[in-house]
Amino acid sequence: MCELIKGKCLCGSVEYEIENKFDQFYICHCEQCRKITGSAYASNLFGDPRQFNIISGSEDIKRFDYNERGFTKAFCTECGSGVPYLNSSGKSIVVPAGTLDAEPVFNDKKIIFYKEKPKWGSENETDSYFDEFPV
């Protein structure tokens, strides 16, 4: 058995633990994932639902299913952070990578719907980089 790692939403209301062994890691640039995250892409890990446990805050989770294309967004009703959810097939827990409190262990990472990647989400030579807020 692998180690369990914990994760939580931004406000800490929703906490969970899962085995630190993920089948897939998808970085998705599709339009729906950009809308769901409000960012250039979604970064989701897929884990075994039998190795997942909500520690606290299950009553603070709201789920939105976008049936047109089979997308889901589960989030904390207190802070709006994405939280893990069971995918529509029931075979995987989808874990927003940014909610983990430790580095994930995964078998494979795929960047998908790359053709839909927005130009503003790409690194380029004119970008400025800072380790914290610029002064």
Image (tube, rainbow, N blue to C red):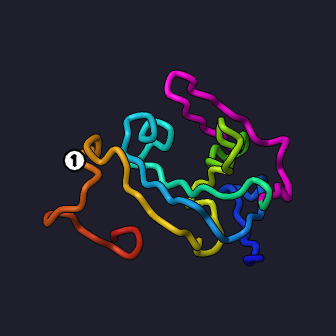
- At a point 48% along the width and 65% down the height, the residue shown is 108
Side of 131 relative to 65 (left or right)? left
- At a point 40% along the width and 68% down the height, the residue shown is 133
Side of 67 relative to 108 (left or right)? right
Circle 1: is it few (<14), some (14-19), or many (20+) Cα within 10 Å? few
Q: What stretch is highlighted in magenta?
A: 52-75
- At a point 73% along the width and 77% down the height, the residue shown is 2
Q: Check residue 58 for magenta coloring.
A: yes
Magenta-colored segment: predominant secondary structure: strand
Percent position (x, y) of residue 124?
17, 62
Q: Residue type at mark 1: give it.
A: Lys
Rendered view: 24 above or below 131: above
Side of 124 relative to 67 (left or right)? left
| Residue where numbered disc 1 is placed | 119
Percent position (x, y) of residue 110?
41, 58
Rendered view: 12 above or below 3: above
